[in-house]
Image (cartoon, rainbow, N blue to C red):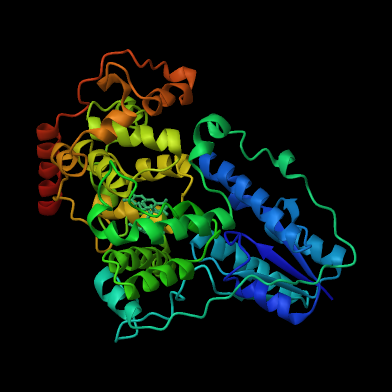
Amino acid sequence: RPILLWFRRDLRLSDHPALSAAAHSGRAVIPVFVHDEITQRLGAAPKWRLGLGVEAFAESLGELGLKLILRKGDALEEISRLVDETGAASVWWMRQYDPEQIKRDTKVKSALQGDGVEAKSFPGHLMFEPWDVQTGQGKFYQVYTPFWRAVRARDVPDRLSAPNKVKAPEQWPDSDDLDDWRMGDAMNRGAEVVRPYLHVGEAAARQRLAIFARDRIDSYHTDRDRMDSDATSGLSENLTYGEISPLALWDAGQRALADGKAGAETFLKEVVWREFAYHLVYHTPHITNESWRAGWESFPWRAESEETMRWKQGRTGIQIVDAAMRELYVTGRMHNRARMLVGSYLTKHMMTHWRVGQDWFAECLVDWDPAANAMGWQWVAGSGPDASPYFRIFNPDTQAEKFDPKRAYRTRWVAELSQSPPETAMAFFDACPRSWNLRPDARYPEPVVDLTAGRNRALSAYEQRKTA
Ligand code: FAD
């Protein structure tokens, strides 16, 4: 009897333990993707990007002679229905670790087992299971550096190549048509504006990694913070949908290290930041929606307002912040250092709750990831574990001088700063909704919050909180 292979954020053929095991079993395999309660709630950009990922993955499966069965609805209902329709004796999947997906998977597992169906989950989304990495006292890590040391000393699992043969069922169950799901409907700027910046699917991800490992990893340690250069791998977009495995990145990093490439160790450390984010999310799931450290919810955070709208629109009047917010809107991505700067300006100078930023990123990022986004925001706001403390406030001007010394990044994204703005900067005005009523020839705005005044206000609120 067939195996239903339930794909979620693991849209790849290689380094896929569940798929490899299913291929080796010699049983017929029915791959399925359910557009369920969780994916239906995704923000506009990640939902649209997921749709593109599903489309590309269905093609890869097609080359193996398999058909990706698409169903929309409650995950348990749809999986159970498919079990009935196909007579599958097993449902296998790759584990996920954020609270929403754990809740769904636990429910599905116990219901299937109750019905006598084998429900089995496999690793693969991470290099190390979050419960396998422990401190000497058998606890989870709350600080990155010892986590990194613990992980660095471990052996990683073996890589798995894509199966070249998988048995197909005699008859395929019905499938929805992906177009009918209209996953791009909420994405006003998808096809025309953002699409050229994407690298969708497993083959594109591998190629991207190969180019990075050949051309850029050597100088990654010195250039990765430069907002004006394309020095990083860009693979977060693929990792989040599982189009490439963390093991592939780790492997490339290790090879580069062996070849004496200077930036390789720093790259490995970044790959482990992703592991750390999942380690934290698994052990302290409240990190996704509540301040991780006690007491931060009662900080006098300011609510959403006309000012936060200006932050979203890239009109804070702080050039480097505005460049980053417009990069996000146009490309669906933002440089890591820029994420830290816009986050610091929002949560400190503007004293706005980090959740406002987290939500906007969840709406706009094509690499939106439940663990990395939550950890990133709590790091920036000072409310997370091993976070940048609240009193450490980035000065956007100093940061811009250091990491965008020739103003190339600001020029690339903020049209109002040039006589003849580049296409990238103009694209923002084509991308943003009419209701925003923005024009490239408008006067560049005054700061929403002056840097010195904002900094003093944040520090005094922080001091008051400490003494309260
Ligand atoms: P590279 O520099 O090439 O790094 C390789 C890989 O390492 C990345 O693809 C990523 O998987 C991992 N990595 C690197 N830095 C981090 C980090 N700080 N935390 C966790 N993993 C990391 N990353 C996301 O993937 N999705 C998010 O939703 C997300 N939200 C963020 C929000 C904030 C406020 C901040 C400060 C950071 C956030 N990050 C997020 C982390 C980081 O900015 C991105 O992973 C990185 O910019 C991706 O670019 P890259 O693939 O070129 O990274």
> Quick check: can you spot residue 384?
no
**Which residue is pictured at 58% across the width and 58% down the height?**
202
Vertical arrangement, residue 358 with respect to residue 387, above or below: above
Q: Which of 245 and 82 is in front in this view?
A: 245
| In the displayed structure image, the side of residue 224 where residue 359 appears, left or right | right
Looking at the rendering, which quadrant does residue 291 occupy? bottom left
> Going 89% across and 63% down the picture, which residue do you hit?
171
Which quadrant would the N terminus be assigned to in this image? bottom right
What is the total number of numbered labels drawn onto the structure image?
A: 0
On the rendered structure, is 454 left or right of 351? left
- Residue 369 appears at what percent x and percent y? 46, 54
Report the residue at 80% width, 75% height from top. Answer: 89
Is 224 placed above or below 268 here?
A: above
Q: Position of residue 464 (x, y in %)?
A: 11, 47
Residue 254 visible in rendering: yes
Where residue 256 appears, x then y in whole percent? 36, 69
Quadrant of the rendered image holding ligand 1: bottom left
